[in-house]
Amino acid sequence: MTSRLAVALACAVLGSGCVSKPLNRNTVKQASTLSDLYEQQVLDNLALFCANPDAVPSFAVPAGGVVNVQNQVTGLMILQATGKSLFLDKSGPSIGGSRTVSGNWALAPINDPDKLQLMRCLFRHVVGHQADGDCDHCRESLARYFGPEWETCAAPTGWLYVGCKRDVPKNACAVGHHGDRYVWVTAEGRDALARVILSTLDIATVAFIHPPPPSKEVTTFEYRGDLLVRQEKRVVVDLIPGPRKKNLDENDLKGFKGLKPDELPAAMRSVERLNYFDPYRGLFFLPR
């Protein structure tokens, strides 16, 4: 009896630390859900644009994931003492164990307006909606981003079926919906769906480089009478980029003669402010 108990407890203790195999297995299982996550998001967005072509898409990509595997083993052994005798309880030892497996994704939603605009053009094209206005420039934007063969390789059409829930056939390979509007794909459209998913991921994960706004360094001088009490340098955003005149000429001042500097329009005053006063300019003047 004692030998069997020792073997059972040893197996329980050693088994509680062997989590590498179940951890690897569950990590692979969680990673395999990525393609399902992307596919479902794209199909649901396509159903959204079938119901409302003027909608804004929603898409998220996993920014990280965690898989936890925890083993817990409990054992109970009761010893009874009678006088000088020590023996096990007749009920025998009890051993219990449990395993807890959990996994989650941390999603990063797409909130860049340029990416959302390009996704909007992509989904509109796939569902067959032609934009009425020229604000989006969808065809030009998609061709510039994906290349001249974008309609065939990046955004194929004619493979998506649309209807109600009762219209979805049993042989549908993938189904998405928005409200009561359903879209589905058969085996013939699997390749086209994969291309649209990859195009969506391409847009979602690209790093658009937004150049910083033009800036300039401004020095501020504060005087009390003729005494310089404070000097501060800072970089400010130039709200009106492009070359400016450092000095106002006669054409700039037409219609403003006789006005004080505080009475000049804001644009005129901003031009004048580019010529800040240098308190040390007299040091570079040598009289003859």
Image: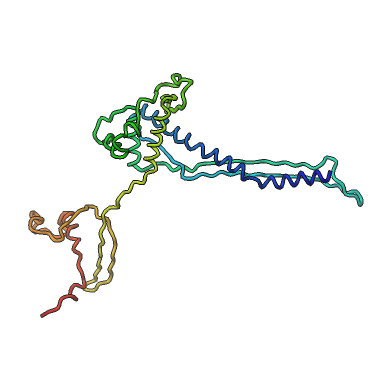
Give 240 or 45, whichever is nearer the viewer: 45
Q: Across the whole image, how many numbered discs are drawn on residues?
A: 0
Residue 127: horizontal and vertical position, in percent?
Answer: 35, 28
Which residue occupies 48% across, 20% down?
A: 170
Q: With respect to residue 277, does 154 lie above or below?
A: above
Where does the N terminus fall, quadrant-wise?
Answer: top right
Which residue occupies 37% across, 35% down?
A: 57
Which residue occupies the extreme right position in the image? 83
Q: How is the image coloured?
A: rainbow
Position of 249 with respect to 170 (left or right) is left
Which residue occupies the extreme bottom position in the image? 288
Position of 151 with respect to 10 (left or right) is left
Residue 52: horizontal and vertical position, in percent?
Answer: 35, 28
Residue 29: horizontal and vertical position, in percent?
Answer: 55, 38
Q: With respect to residue 75, does 57 lie above or below?
A: above
Give 13 or 132, whichever is nearer the viewer: 13
Using the rendered view, name the quadrant where residue 118 is placed.
top left
Position of 287 with respect to 74 (left or right) is left
Give 132 or 144, whichever is nearer the viewer: 144
Where does the C terminus fall, quadrant-wise?
Answer: bottom left
Residue 31: horizontal and vertical position, in percent?
Answer: 51, 40
Give 273 or 4, whichever is nearer the viewer: 4
